[in-house]
């Protein structure tokens, strides 16, 4: 007999536990679903079961709780179907499908192989084939809703990487639900009365898309005529949803597919306001009450107490297949079109399983494809793969990288072409820094449209300016400084880039310079060693930093050689080689890549790209560029190094073919390599 008072008490406990642990998960940077599933595990036989679990969540209470959870699942799958946006794949179709296939086929194949190895311990007879295929489908799943939430929390849905991840996950969603429908259909066909019903799944799908979809399109004019979502319109949608869910359950294909397909055939064109109101009404009930109920009930079915040492071995194998297959399959597919960092970021995002995996596992448990032990192990896998996504993604794609991509996306949306910005810290006296300006002009050749900022902060005079004879001398000195800076600007303009001069008095040059550099948001910083605030600029700047090593104080003229450009190449830090390549091509100088076998390999690669590069010994007349390792610059000066390059933070590996092509395109538009080398030119 159903005890209504106990059912209501269970609802209160479940909702409180789900909200508390869901909120705790969010505070830890995890999706709320992780906390809700953990709440169910804690309330179940794993922890509280022997104490209070059997009284509160005993055998007689599980069916009504499961029924409420199933209603929540119907609403959730309907929402997933409605939010399946075909526009996500437009313009990204080829790469999205490529990534989705790699992310699906590799873990699917590995999951099937693992299932064959453990089938004898968990299933037998006619259940073997459905079990093997089910494990493959479960390993291949990606939680589209959780992935979308992770992207939204970090603002990544606004950048190309986020859009591509969503497009790939949308394709994976379709593949996963299709595969699961086939698996459940095979399992249902094994039941005597269900064999002929499963065959109706294909006509059902055709009926939904060819007949029901055009009929549902009539909801749009009815909604526009009423001006709002009336109870009658919402009732029609709910009746259709429930009938569709009942039909697929009756066919032994499972009700989630009926709910998903009904959401997928809802009208899209001109139905934005209608769909928004439907989602607003249903999501409040589903998200706040019924969906947490589903995840807690899913956790109640997990019993970690029953696991033994052999189960831990199975869990290790499941984790290896699930994580390894998903990451490697996704990365290998994405790497054919994207740089390594972006490929790993997409692979990490597609490894999250969360809601989708729990739904799939619950279906497998209900259909008898999974036993209780394997269900518990797979839920643990779903929790771990979901929980690892956020921290791992921040490691691979840090927040500052996301902020940079968002800024680029916003400029692209406005149709603004961002200039390649080189900021030069000009020491005093500016009149002696023509070589520094010419170096900046040469490095600005890295951008198709470029801008050089000449930044000069002048300390306040030791004594206060007063009316009288001292005022005219101070004003004359200030005017002379501005004139010298304008002369430097003319040197830069002669080579093509636009120039801005930033000059002012400062009470603390070493403190204000790092702030000035950060506020300018440059793509490259050039400054002499010994500049006030040098350590602060170097450590706080995200972009590459080129340090000019000059003998003596920063105010002395720079002695940069006029010979070939040489780079002491470090395969783990390609920024110095990238700067050396820029100077060589813009100056029409040969490039020497020094540093062993890998340096020789880079030289040969550049030769194939048409660059005059060798790996011979570095002559004394060479302009030597080296990676900035953060040590004492005095040692680098003693080794004959003229420029130190600190790489961009979170830099991608250099695509040398693209780099050479971009530089040559820039030169062809404005600067020719045959012109006199700006770095080697005599001082003006």
Image (cartoon, rainbow, N blue to C red):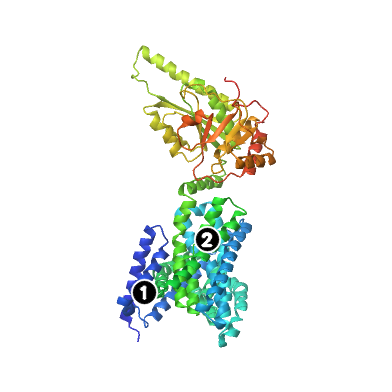
Residue 571 higher or lower than 24, as above or below = above
Q: Secondary structure at mark 1?
A: loop
Going from N to C along the chain, the mark reached first, 2 or 1, is 1
User: Quick check: can you spot residue 312?
Assistant: yes
Residue 242: mark in rendering: none
Q: Which image quarter: residue 280?
A: bottom left
Quarter in which the N terminus is drawn = bottom left
User: Residue at coordinates 47% horizontally, 36% vertically from top-left?
Assistant: 520
Of residues 451 and 271, the one nearer the viewer is 451
User: Quick check: can you spot residue 233?
Assistant: no
| Residue found farthest to the top | 469
Q: Is residue 331 left or right of residue 535?
A: right
Quarter in which the C terminus is drawn = top right
Of residues 201 and 346, the one nearer the viewer is 346
User: In 3D space, how far apart are the residues under numbered discs 2 and 1 (Cα atoms)?
Assistant: 30 Å
Q: Is residue 464 left or right of residue 294?
A: left
Q: Secondary structure at mark 2?
A: helix
Q: In the rendering, at what x and y percent does residue 113 appear? A: 57, 70
**Residue linked to disc 2:** 350
Of residues 654 and 310, the one nearer the viewer is 310
User: Residue at coordinates 63% horizontally, 73% vertically from top-left?
Assistant: 210
Q: In the rendering, at what x and y percent does residue 498 appear? A: 56, 31
**Residue linked to disc 1:** 44
User: Residue at coordinates 34% horizontally, 74% vertically from top-left?
Assistant: 11
Q: In the rendering, at what x and y percent does residue 230 appear? A: 46, 70
User: Residue at coordinates 65% horizontally, 25% vertically from top-left?
Assistant: 676
Q: Residues within 10 Å of mark 1 (few under 14, many from 20)?
A: many
Residue 114 higher or lower than 58, as above or below = above
Of residues 541 and 453, the one nearer the viewer is 541
Q: In the rendering, at what x and y percent does residue 636 appear? A: 50, 31
């Amino acid at each position: 007999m159903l005890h209504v008072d106990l059912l209501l008490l269970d609802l209160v406990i479940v909702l409180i536990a789900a909200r508390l642990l869901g909120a705790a998960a969010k505070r830890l940077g995890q999706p709320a679903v992780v906390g809700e599933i953990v709440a169910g595990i804690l309330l179940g036989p794993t922890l509280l079961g022997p104490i209070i679990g059997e009284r509160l969540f005993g055998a007689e209470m599980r069916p009504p709780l499961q029924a409420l959870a199933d209603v929540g699942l119907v609403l959730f799958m309907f929402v997933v179907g409605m939010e399946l946006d075909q526009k996500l794949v437009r313009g990204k179709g080829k790469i999205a499908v490529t990534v989705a296939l790699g992310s699906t086929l590799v873990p699917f194949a590995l999951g099937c192989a693992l299932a064959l190895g453990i089938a004898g311990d968990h299933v037998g007879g006619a259940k073997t084939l459905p079990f093997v295929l089910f494990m493959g489908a479960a390993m291949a799943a990606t939680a589209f809703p959780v992935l979308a939430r992770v992207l939204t929390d970090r603002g990544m849905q606004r950048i190309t990487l986020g859009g591509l991840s969503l497009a790939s996950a949308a394709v994976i969603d379709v593949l996963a639900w299709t595969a699961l429908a086939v698996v459940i259909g095979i399992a249902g066909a094994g039941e005597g009365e269900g064999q002929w019903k499963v065959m109706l799944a294909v006509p059902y799908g055709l009926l939904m898309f060819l007949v029901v979809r055009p009929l549902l399109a009539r909801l749009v004019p009815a909604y526009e005529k009423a001006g709002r979502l009336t109870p009658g319109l919402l009732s029609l949608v709910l009746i259709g949803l429930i009938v569709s869910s009942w039909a697929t359950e009756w066919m032994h294909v499972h009700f989630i597919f009926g709910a998903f397909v009904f959401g997928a055939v809802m009208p899209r064109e001109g139905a934005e306001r209608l769909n928004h109101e439907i989602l607003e009404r249903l999501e409040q009930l589903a998200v706040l009450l019924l969906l947490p109920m589903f995840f807690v009930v899913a956790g109640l079915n997990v019993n970690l107490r029953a696991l033994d040492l052999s189960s831990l071995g199975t869990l290790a194998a499941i984790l290896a297949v699930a994580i390894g297959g998903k990451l490697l399959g996704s990365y290998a597919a994405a790497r054919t079109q994207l740089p390594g960092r972006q490929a790993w970021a997409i692979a990490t995002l597609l490894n999250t399983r969360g809601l989708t995996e729990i739904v799939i596992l619950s279906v497998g448990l209900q259909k008898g494809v999974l036993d209780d032990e394997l269900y518990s192990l797979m839920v643990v896998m779903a929790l771990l793969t979901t929980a690892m996504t956020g921290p791992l993604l921040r490691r691979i794609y840090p927040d500052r990288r996301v902020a940079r991509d968002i800024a680029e996306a916003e400029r692209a949306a406005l149709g603004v072409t961002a200039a390649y910005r080189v900021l030069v810290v000009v020491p005093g006296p500016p009149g002696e820094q023509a070589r520094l300006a010419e170096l900046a002009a040469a490095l600005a050749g890295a951008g198709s449209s470029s801008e050089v900022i000449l930044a000069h902060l002048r300390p306040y005079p030791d004594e206060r300016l007063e009316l009288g004879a001292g005022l005219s001398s101070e004003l004359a000195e200030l005017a002379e400084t501005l004139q010298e800076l304008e002369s430097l600007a003319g040197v830069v303009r002669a080579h093509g880039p636009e120039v801005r001069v930033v000059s002012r008095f400062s009470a603390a040059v070493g403190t204000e310079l790092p702030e000035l550099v950060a506020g300018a948001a440059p793509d490259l910083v050039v400054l002499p060693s010994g500049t006030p605030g040098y350590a602060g600029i170097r450590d706080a700047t995200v972009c590459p930093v080129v340090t000019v090593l000059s003998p003596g104080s920063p105010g002395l003229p720079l002695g940069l050689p006029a010979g070939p450009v040489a780079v002491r190449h470090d395969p783990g830090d390609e920024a110095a080689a990238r700067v050396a390549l820029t100077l060589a091509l813009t100056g029409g100088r040969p490039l020497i890549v020094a540093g062993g076998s890998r340096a020789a390999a880079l030289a040969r690669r550049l030769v194939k790209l048409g660059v005059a590069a060798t790996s011979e010994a570095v002559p004394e007349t060479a302009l030597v560029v080296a990676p900035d390792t953060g040590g004492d610059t005095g040692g680098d000066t003693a080794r004959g190094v003229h420029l130190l390059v600190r790489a961009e933070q979170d830099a991608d590996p250099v695509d040398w073919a693209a780099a050479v092509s971009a530089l040559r395109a820039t030169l062809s538009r404005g600067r020719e390599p045959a012109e006199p080398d700006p770095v080697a030119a005599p001082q003006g």
